[in-house]
Image (cartoon, helix red, strand yellow):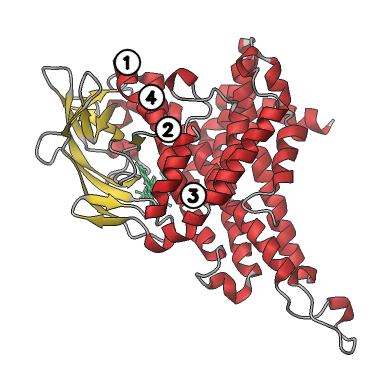
Amino acid sequence: MAQQIADRRDVDFVLHEVLQVEHLSKHEKFAEFNKKTVDLIISEARNLAIKEILPTREIGDREGAQFDQGKVTLPESFHRAYDLFKEGEWLAMIENPDWGGQGMPRSIALAANDYLVGANLAFMMYPGLTHGAGKLVDTFGTDKQKKLYLKKMFTGEWTGTMLLTEPEAGSDVGALTTSAVKNDDGTYSITGNKIFISSGEHDLAENIIHPVLARIEGAPEGTKGISLFLVPKIWVNDDGSLGEPNDVVCTGIEEKMGIHGNSTASLALGGKGKCKGTLLGEENKGMREMFIMMNEARLLVGLQGFCCASASYMHAVNYAKERVQGKNLEKMMDEGVSSVPIIQHPDVRRQLMSMKVNVEAMRSLIYYIGMCEDQITISDSEEEKEKYKGIIDVLIPVAKGYVTDRAFDVCSHGVQIYGGYGYIKEYPAEQLLRDCRITMIYEGTNGIQAMDLLGRKLGLNNGKPIMDLLGEMQHTIA
Ligand SMILES: Cc1cc2nc3c(=O)[nH]c(=O)nc-3n(C[C@H](O)[C@H](O)[C@H](O)COP(=O)(O)OP(=O)(O)OC[C@H]3O[C@@H](n4cnc5c(N)ncnc54)[C@H](O)[C@@H]3O)c2cc1C
């Protein structure tokens, strides 16, 4: 059977031959993850992706998320896929098993996500954002917040979002105007309008937990005065039961170029003066806290772009082997010669090679960042931890900005290889191109990534991280 979504040989090559992930199992923390287990995890992810999630991709694009009077419904097929995804405990692969995670190395989880995200990016944004939001609770939450929210989020029973953007505050998050006023019981009343909120409203889960950036009354202007709050769609009582709806109203969803299966919601918070939230972390430290999570979110967006590119390449190469058109260049003057599959044409091969090279490079880069995280987890040396942390800091804008720029180019070649059919909705190439396009925009546009790389990351710590990265490259070459 033709390979779909990702080439298993390439996934295994990066995991086992380039990164040699088995070495992680020598450390107590990852002792369970020997080669056999790793291979099983990837096979299971691949099965779920191909059999259950991939069939939702085109339906999700065609039907999209539907808005009606404050409620959003998703295509029926998303529900079955989400239930199976939850049952398989795929949402928080790298997290602590006590909270519903699997304690898996990051590099292996990224390889599993290679298939899952490649099967349907729009669908996978629901669990992806939930993981990110849960991670905020895990990192900055009080014991009470963790107890109330974390397991429900990491098991996918409740989903999560990220509420940063407002009409006048996009790239410049510091311009936001959503306000927070402290109440006598320690909660905060939140008022404001957030736009473009991915997974902001839907019917996959009974509750949605929104981490919200807002400014406490009297706080400084700009990013220094921003705090982070946890605002559930339905209030969660102290005993964990669900209380009243929390005055978070979805006023509409966007009609978009791609990712139609993911709802991009406008949310009005506190329109009736009754939206409550609890502070997550410290007052006025919201931007710093969000930035700590930004690496995670930006890596995920890089992965999203790469997965579209990988899927586009697999479709293109399979199609090029089957589509018969034109004569072989070397025999085209011969009498009575048959037409050949287009993969024999040099220009098609050139494009396929360019796609393949880019996809393999993206995969290596993204898994490598995962491995750097794993090195931080297993290392006993503070110096080594700092080194890998620095390398990750430098590589994140590359994984987000450069990878998604290239991914879009790859998807464009994918359309080209299908010829006219590439432009037709019946074939997958055009959807992958449209879905991929957003990855260059959200989570900090690629222009902002370039500024981050040049303005902040290259000079970080007097250039030590970039020198460490070059050192790692030299080591590989030698
Ligand atoms: C489908 C979708 C899903 C989204 N999901 C979420 C979500 O879940 N949560 C959330 O909070 N937000 C979300 N967003 C918002 C997204 O992150 C913003 O759209 C993005 O950060 C850009 O902000 P903006 O649209 O206001 O563009 P602007 O900030 O107005 O930027 C316009 C252009 O100007 C450039 N630019 C802006 N400032 C500078 C500068 N200082 N220097 C150089 N160039 C600059 C940008 O690169 C861009 O090309 C989503 C958006 C979309 C479309």
The label shown at residue 433 is: none
Residue 385 horizontal side relative to residue 79, left or right: right
Which residue in the protein does label 1 denote? 142
Ranked by sequence position, the earlier of labels 4 and 1 is 1
Q: Amino acid at mark 4?
A: Lys
4 or 1: mark nearer the eye: 4
Residue in the foreground of this view, choosing between 156 and 311: 156
Q: Residue visible at 59% across and 76% down?
A: 420
Contact check, label 3 and label 2, Cβ < 8 Å = no
| Residue 110 quadrant | top right
Secondary element under disc 2, as helix, strand or loop, is helix
Q: Residue visible at 50% across and 43% down?
A: 301
Ranked by sequence position, the earlier of labels 2 and 1 is 2
Which residue in the protein does label 3 denote? 121
Residue in the foreground of this view, choosing between 38 and 420: 38
4 or 3: mark nearer the eye: 4
Residue 81 horizontal side relative to residue 254, left or right: right
| Residue 461 quadrant | top right
The answer to whether residue 442 is visible is no
Which residue in the protein does label 2 denote? 132
Ranked by sequence position, the earlier of labels 2 and 4 is 2
Real-space Cα distance between discs 4 and 1?
Answer: 14 Å
Which residue in the protein does label 4 denote? 151
Secondary element under disc 3, as helix, strand or loop, is helix
Q: Amino acid at mark 3?
A: Leu
Contact check, label 4 and label 1, Cβ < 8 Å = no
The answer to whether residue 349 is visible is yes
